[in-house]
Amino acid sequence: MNSQAQQSQTWNANKLAEQARWLKTICDQPLVRFLANERGRELFLGLDCSPARLTVEQAGWRLGFTVDEIGILMSQAKIQAVTSSIARDGDTSIVLNQEERLRPLGHPRKQQSKYFPSERVRELESNEVWLDKALRTIRMYWRIKKNKRALMDNEQTTGEEADGD
């Protein structure tokens, strides 16, 4: 009888392991990950109350930005690049300055997880001026990056033509 119980437990453990492998295979599919993420976003945004701190992704959901865009809005260097570029051409008050940037809690290092105070994100969510400046900052950042890339490509093409002569 003891042997039968052990066999039954072994069979159940093997069946459970097989189901876990199958579930992992299904969950690793891009469409399933996307749908799970979208459903999680909908559930999170539908909450009446939110946690005291938000992850980068949750803050992005609340503010309407992607994770990459939140990274731009946090970065001192990226905001500095935008403001210095605009300073040559015009009015820097149309983009975020260093004091207005999105600041994570606890001064995390570059590779550490970032969290934001939920109250601050709620304030920014309803601040039309900040949202406008944030969007302009992101657009300017990508424009600057695109122009630098085009300039580098142009220099490489010019250098190759000079080498060929």
Image (cartoon, grey):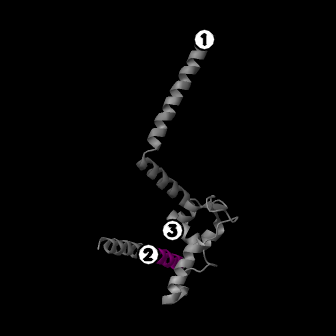
Badge 3 vs badge 1, beta-carbon distance below 8 Å: no
Residue under label 1: 3
**Quarter of the figure with the N terminus:** top right
Residue 67: where, in percent of width, then height?
52, 63
For badge 3, the amino acid type reads Glu
Magenta region, residue range: 131-143
Upstream in sequence: badge 3 or badge 1: 1
Q: Please say if 76 is above or below 8.
A: below
Quarter of the figure with residue 155: bottom left
The crowding category of the residue bearing disc 3, from other C-alpha atoms within 10 Å (few below 14, some 14 to 19, many at least 20), is some
Magenta part mainly helix, strand or loop? helix
User: Does any portion of residue 158 appear in the rendered image?
Assistant: yes
Magenta region includes residue 152:
no
Secondary structure found at label 3: helix
Query: In terms of depth relative to the viewer, which is nearer, 68 or 33?
Result: 68
For badge 2, the amino acid type reads Lys
Upstream in sequence: badge 2 or badge 3: 3
Quarter of the figure with residue 45: bottom right
User: Can you name the residue that lies furthest to the bottom here?
Assistant: 90
Residue under label 3: 69
Upstream in sequence: badge 2 or badge 1: 1
Q: Which mark is residue 148?
A: 2
